[in-house]
Image (cartoon, rainbow, N blue to C red):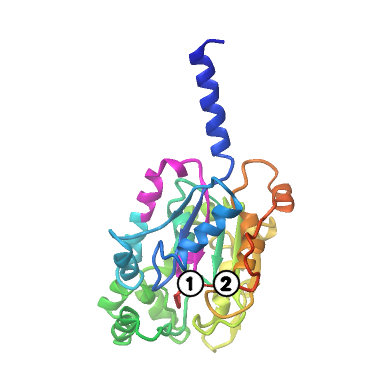
C-alpha cells in the first residue's frame, strides 16, 4: 500500500470517527439568544460533555446576539424560517441530517422547519414547553425586559391587526378560541403549519419522516396558556380544554401526528417545574439519550449510553432567561 492510498483510508476513517454522533441544532425561545453562557451556551456544553466531539449549532438570526434577541420578539416568522432553512442547508456539518431541540417558541419553529424545508433532514425533534396549538394569552415579561414590554404594548393594540400580525412574533401563534374564524383568517403562521386551512401533504409527509417527536410539558407552567399546548392540547370555543386525541388535527391526521403516534414515534413527557426551568439532571437523563446516535440500533444506544455528570449537582436548574 503506497503512501497516498494509506492517507486516503486514514482520511475516511477519521471522518467516520468524527461523524459518529449525529449533529444537534438548537433554537432558543423568546427573549433569549443563541449563545448566552447561562442558556443556549450551557445547553451546548452539556451536550458536548456527554457526547465528546459532537457538532452543535445554535440558531442565530441577525448579526449578533443582541439582534438575535430582538428578532425573537419582532419580525415575520415566515421570513425568519426561510433564512433558517438557508443557514442550515449551507452548513456542511449538517448535510447528512441532525437532531433538534426547540426551547419554547423555538419548538414550533423547528417543527415548521421540518414541515416546510427539512433539507437537511431532522432525525429526532424534542420540544420544551412549546406552543404547538398556540396561546390564548400573551406571555408576561421579566422585570426590566424592555423589548418584551414593547412587544406586549404593541400586541395589545390588536393581535390580528395588519401591523401586529405581521410584525410581532408572539401574535403569529396567538389563538383566541372565542373567535376562531378571525384567527384562521388573520393569523399568518400557526393555521398554516397545523394544516387548519389547506391540507399541505408535504407538511404531513415531512413530519411523518421523523424518527421521534418528543413533546415536553412543564408541569407548573404559568407563562404558556394553556400549558398543555406543549402537547397540542387547546381550548374549544366553549373554553373546554381538548387533548390532542380529541381534535381533528389528530383524528383526521392533518399533519401526521396520528401516524407518528401509532408507529411509536410520538412521545409525551413532563418536566417538573415552571416554564424553562430545566434541571440539568433532566436534560442529561431525559434528553441526551435521544441525541447523537449514529445510524444503527438507536434503542441499544439509548439503553447503553454512558453519561458522566462532571460532578454537577443533580438538583441544579438550568434557567434559560425566557418566558416563551
The C terminus sits in image quarter: bottom left
The residue tagged 2 is: 278
* Left/right of residue 137 with respect to residue 275 in the rendered view: left
Q: Position of residue 124 (x, y in %)?
A: 58, 54
Q: Secondary structure at mark 1?
A: loop
Residue 102 circle label: none
Q: Quadrant of residue 62?
A: bottom left
**Magenta extent:** 84-108
* Left/right of residue 210 with respect to residue 139 in the rendered view: right
Residue drawn at 40 percent across, 62 percent down: 34
Viewer-side residue, 194 vs 80: 80
Q: Is residue 102 magenta?
A: yes
Quick check: 265 above or below 53? below
Q: Are marks 2 and 1 in contact (CB under 8 Å)?
A: yes
Q: Position of residue 86 (x, y in %)?
A: 35, 49
Quick check: 59 above or below 186? above
Q: Secondary structure at mark 2?
A: strand
Circle nearer the N terminus (2, 1): 2
Viewer-side residue, 240 vs 168: 168
Q: Position of residue 186 (x, y in %)?
A: 35, 75
Kindly tell me whether residue 194 is visible in this rendering: no
The residue tagged 1 is: 320
- Circle 1 crowding by C-alpha within 10 Å: few under 14, some 14–19, many from 20: many
Q: Position of residue 275 (x, y in %)?
A: 53, 78
Count every numbered label the image shows and give the total: 2
Q: Is residue 246 magenta?
A: no
Viewer-side residue, 95 vs 248: 95
Residue drawn at 33 percent across, 64 percent down: 65
* Left/right of residue 64 with respect to residue 220 in the rendered view: left
Amino acid at each position: 500500500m503506497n503512501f497516498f492510498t494509506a492517507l486516503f483510508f486514514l482520511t475516511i476513517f477519521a471522518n467516520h470517527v468524527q461523524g459518529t454522533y449525529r449533529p444537534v441544532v438548537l433554537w432558543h425561545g423568546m427573549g433569549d439568544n443563541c449563545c448566552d453562557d447561562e442558556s443556549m451556551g450551557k445547553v451546548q456544553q452539556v451536550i458536548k460533555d456527554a457526547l465528546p466531539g459532537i457538532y452543535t449549532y445554535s440558531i442565530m438570526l441577525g448579526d449578533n446576539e443582541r439582534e438575535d434577541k430582538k428578532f425573537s420578539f419582532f419580525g415575520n416568522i415566515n421570513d425568519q424560517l426561510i433564512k433558517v432553512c438557508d443557514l442550515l442547508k449551507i452548513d456542511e456539518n449538517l448535510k447528512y441530517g441532525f437532531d433538534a431541540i426547540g426551547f419554547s417558541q423555538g419548538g414550533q419553529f423547528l417543527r415548521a422547519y421540518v414541515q416546510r424545508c427539512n433539507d437537511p433532514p431532522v432525525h429526532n425533534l424534542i420540544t420544551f414547553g412549546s406552543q404547538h396549538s398556540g396561546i390564548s394569552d400573551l406571555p408576561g415579561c421579566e422585570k426590566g425586559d424592555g423589548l418584551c414590554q414593547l412587544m406586549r404594548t404593541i400586541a395589545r393594540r390588536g393581535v390580528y391587526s395588519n401591523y401586529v400580525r405581521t410584525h410581532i412574533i408572539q401574535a403569529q401563534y396567538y389563538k383566541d378560541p372565542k373567535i376562531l374564524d378571525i384567527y384562521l383568517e388573520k393569523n399568518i403562521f400557526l393555521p398554516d403549519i397545523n394544516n387548519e386551512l389547506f391540507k399541505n401533504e408535504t407538511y404531513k409527509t415531512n413530519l411523518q419522516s421523523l424518527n421521534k417527536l418528543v413533546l415536553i410539558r412543564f408541569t407548573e407552567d404559568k407563562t404558556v396558556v394553556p400549558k398543555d399546548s406543549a402537547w397540542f392540547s387547546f381550548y374549544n370555543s366553549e373554553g373546554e380544554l381538548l387533548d390532542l386525541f380529541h381534535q381533528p388535527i389528530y383524528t383526521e391526521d392533518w399533519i401526521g401526528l396520528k401516524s407518528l403516534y401509532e408507529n411509536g414515534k410520538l412521545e409525551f413527557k413532563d418536566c417538573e417545574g415552571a416554564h424553562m426551568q430545566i434541571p440539568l439532571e433532566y436534560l442529561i437523563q431525559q434528553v441526551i439519550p435521544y441525541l447523537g446516535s449514529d445510524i444503527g440500533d438507536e434503542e441499544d444506544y439509548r439503553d447503553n449510553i454512558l453519561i458522566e455528570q462532571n460532578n454537577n449537582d443533580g438538583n441544579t436548574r438550568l434557567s434559560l432567561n425566557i418566558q416563551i
